[in-house]
Image (cartoon, rainbow, N blue to C red):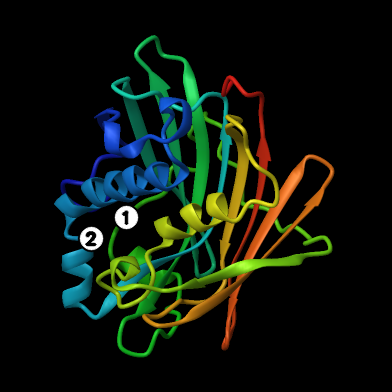
Amino acid sequence: MAQNIQTEYQFPIKIASYDVGEGDRLRLSAVLRYQQEAAEQHLRPGGLGWKDLGEQGIAFVASRWHATIRRMPAMEEAVTLTTWHRERKGPRFLRCYEWMDAAGEVLIQGVMQFALVAVEDHRLLRGDEFMRLAAMPEPRRGVACTDPERFRLPAMETVGEYRVRRSDIDRNGHMNNTHYADLLWDFLPVEPAGRQPVDVQLHFAGESRLGDTLTMTAGTEGESLFVRGDHDRGSAFAARVVLGAADGI
């Protein structure tokens, strides 16, 4: 393990009012933002934070996210987010996340898949580059953290467009991955009517740049709802979500 990097990192959170939506429940995009910050806090002491990696001309880029949600945290609720690096599979890195309430009940379990790329030309780096940086895996951690799965899109219909704005762009020069969760929610093919997500997958296919116009399509198959965004260079993202009961449980 790199010097000063713990096996896992625990991030205490009190859910802020600006991070909740309907029913005072945490937004999907806020789940991703908190997880992004927890990973940064975990890796930064060992010199693997965003700024440190940027000085070496490299960066982490998210490629897939899968989460199962038993209950979305509520406004002003105190929760603990635990994260750890699970393992490397070739050029892919799998990081797990577990959210727990004050009573120790699991709220959300999930995994994010990353790749390490060269900032200048977005070239995918070999997996052993990450091992050179000395972050070690925790493959035997006893918490559900399954790989993101592939999914097949059903028949899709155009439901609108979204033009990428300045506020969408992150320090890597493209739309931050957390914003795609907002697009998923904004372009659902049905009105959620107070229902909360219980299972969600996001696949980040290609970067969205300032001024890009995403053509948004959506569809349904059984209980699953699908949303996809495409720009003139190809697919930007695809998502699948299952909604639970109206009380958010």
Tell me where residue 127 appears, x and y as whole percent: 45, 70
The residue under the point 32% across, 20% down is: 77
Considering only order in the chain, which callout, 1 or 2, is on the residue closer to the N terminus? 2
**Please, is residue 24 above or below residue 52 in the view?**
above
Asked if labels 1 and 2 touch by Cβ distance under 8 angstroms, the answer is: yes
Furthest residue to the top? Answer: 103
Tell me where residue 7 appears, x and y as whole percent: 31, 39
Q: Which mark is residue 48?
A: 2
Tell me where residue 75 appears, x and y as whole percent: 34, 24
The residue under the point 41% across, 41% down is: 31
The reply, left or right, for residue 136 in relation to residue 66 is left
User: Dot 2: what SS?
Assistant: loop
Q: Which mark is residue 53?
A: none
Q: What is the spatial separation of the Cα atoms under label 2 and label 1, in whole angstroms?
A: 9 Å
Q: Nearer the viewer, residue 139 or 94?
A: 94
Tell me where residue 198 appears, x and y as whole percent: 62, 33
- What residue is pinned by disc 1? 135
Q: Nearer the viewer, residue 74 or 10?
A: 74
Give the residue type that dot 1 points to.
Ala
**Please, is residue 200 above or below residue 117 in the view?**
above
Give the residue type that dot 2 points to.
Leu
The residue under the point 37% across, 43% down is: 30
Tell me how many marks there are.
Answer: 2
